[in-house]
Amino acid sequence: MEAFQTLDAVMLPLAQANVDTDQILPARYLQKPRSAQFDEFLFRDLRYRKDGSENPEFLLNQPAYRAARVVVAGDNFACGSSREHAVWALYDYGFRVAIAPSFGDIFFANALKNGLLPIVLPAAAVAALIGSARANPGAKVVVDLAAQAVTAPDGAVHRFTIDQFSRHCLLEGLDEIDYTLSQSAHISAYEEALDKR
Amino acid sequence: MEKNTAAQTMLEKIWSRHRVIERSDGQSLLYVDSHLLQDGSAPAFAMLRQRGLTVRAPQRATATQDHYVPTDSRDLNSVADPEKREMANALQRDSASAGIRFFSLDDRRQGIVHVVGPEQGLSQPGMFIVCGDSHTATHGALGALAIGIGASDVAHVLATQALWLPQPKTLRITIDGALPSGVSAKDIILAIIGRIGAAGASGQAIEYAGSTIRALSVEGRMTVCNMSIEAAARAGMIAPDDRTFEWLAGRPFAPTGADWDRALARWRQLPSDEEARFDREVNIDAGTLAPMVTWGNSPEDALPISARVPDPAAAPSAQRREGMQKTLAYMGLTPGMALTDLAIDQVFIGSCTNGRIEDLRAAAGIAAGRRVAPGVAAWVVAGSTLVKLQAEAEGLDRIFTAAGFEWRHAGCSMCLATNGDHVAPGKRCASTSNRNFVGRQGPGSRTHLMSPAMAAAAAVTGRLTDVRQLIARN
Ligand code: SF4
């Protein structure tokens, strides 16, 4: 996994609540292997019209937002299906941070395992970020994982919490399986006790 | 969070029993009793291979093909898209090389993973169950903690047989009273989601309780737990009782003899203690419930069938108004129109929410002696091959085909459309599945979620219909 420390990047504001993972990555691409470039499929049915041309109304197609690497969305972002492909699509496009008042739990866990930092901020802070990204397309935020802070375009600093293990893994680019394997004696002990119950 | 206090919820009991170790950040490594796999698992096995890891406890895993299988035949070669065919084939290969139990298309035990687990007795009270699929909470209906996970976590569980999780908060939803006629488990869960919202149980595990839940069959309980994720819950569960134990007894993987007695004694300890405290409580009077349908693109857009399409002008915020306008445009609806005026093109009875024998019986009860309305394509897709065989033994297939329904083989089918079964663009479908998202049943599809009886009623009338009117005429 690629390490994440800081990022200074353009926001993509998605004002809706309950943006589901079917929207982020439609099911008809689920059979693609991880080696595929999923950026093409990101928000596929919102980004493209039926005839395959770009839908100019979708913000990601507007020049100021094309370079976005931070998605800012309403409540319950990426709810629904457990497809990790939704994370892969955001990641392959270049997104490294997602900010919302709440996330689908499965997406949240998936994101952390792929180097995409999910940040929970209060609804008012998220609304302010969306407001400034809409008022000034191309507006940037600075995300600092070590300091656990998001600095808005107007200079406002929003602190966020993240569990210390995930923070460490992201900062160092480590992944959880290695850590768990290093604890396998505990798992064996549990299994032995299980056999005796 | 208080732990080791005398009174515990069912979640806390299962949690502490499965905790291997705890991390400094409070997350627990929980030991997985049962790992269910389906034909979307190829990326997880690829991750394992890439890292040179092996499957730690293959005997604790079970695999079945459901998402990519054809439902008009049992011939995988009929799947035209080679990548999709490969997903189904990969599961067979990966299971074989890891020594994982596998139910192939010619095995009677094949079906949708969330129908198969309970049906085989693989899902039992008190277990910690995971599956790389968001509707895993279904298995919580037996009194288990069952969690849906992504591909990286599937790989983690394959390699370690354990999963790191933060302990969810607890939400108890208590429903008391007798269900009015025509109201089923599906209506209960749609009403709950309509009430608490699609984000309503975020970060929480729901325990469904009360006399209405206790009076539900085990199948009905699975329907309720299945859609917990549509309220953003981490899990959904129901205390096991004599009905659960009776339902489980004799199933292929259920314990037998002295093992059964020991298990039973343990299972009886599982229900939340009387004094246990939940982080949040919601109470619902069953007498207020009615047959439900969804009108929009989120399961929270659920209304009684007697209602009208809501008006964005009445939305509480500009953002919500904009969202509703988009939804109405996508769904082809006008504000204020009666839901019962909506003509439908397709009907899908099936899925892990409503593809069990009882669901098919309920739908057949409405279809019997009636005809599918002209121009409507109506399908019944059993949740498992065993469900299909049982229905055929009861003559339900003949009731459906005589009425003009198509009787299909078991699989996920039109719920997600990954196998090619789909709702055509702009077409309106009465569906017993669990998601009405934009494009869920195929690009441009318009989905209305409802119970099996309501879907059958829509099939025979050609529009959304209050099933109670047909029941009255039966
Ligand atoms: S029936 Fe639908 S929701 Fe259930 S597992 Fe299959 S695709 Fe997922």
Image: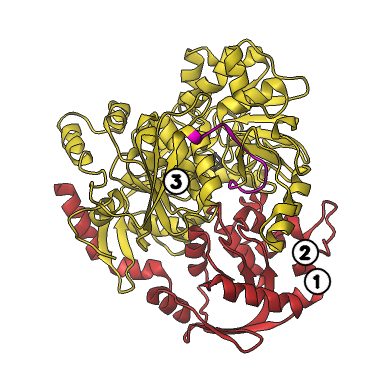
- Residue B20 sits in which quadrant? bottom left
Chain painted in yellow in the figure:
B
According to the colouring, which chain is red? A
Q: Do marks 3 and 2 share a chain?
A: no
Camera-near label (3 vs 2) is 2
Tell me where residue B18 appears, x and y as whole percent: 26, 54
Say what amino acid the circle numbered 2 marks: Phe
Tell me the element at label 2.
Answer: loop
Are the two marked residues, 1 and 2, in contact with CB atoms closer than 8 angstroms? Answer: yes
What is the chain letter for disc 2?
A
Q: CA distance from mark 1 to mark 2?
A: 7 Å
Identify the residue under disc 2.
A58
Q: Main secondary structure of the magenta part?
A: loop
Tag 3 residue: B136
The amino acid type found where label 3 is placed reads: Thr
Q: In screen coordinates, is B230 left or right of B249?
A: right
Helix, strand or loop at disc 1? loop
Q: Which residue is mark 1?
A: A62
Taking the spot 73% from the left edge, 36% from the top edge, the residue there is: B428
Q: Is residue B80 magenta?
A: no
- Looking at the image, can residue A48 be seen? yes
Residue B190: image location, x then y, percent: 54, 40
In the image, the segment drawn in magenta is B288-300
On screen, residue B24 above or below B236: below
Q: Is the residue marked by circle 1 packed among few (<14), some (14-19), or many (20+) residues within 10 Å?
A: some
* Chain letter of disc 3 in the image: B
Which residue is at a point 19% across and 41% down the rendered structure image? B266
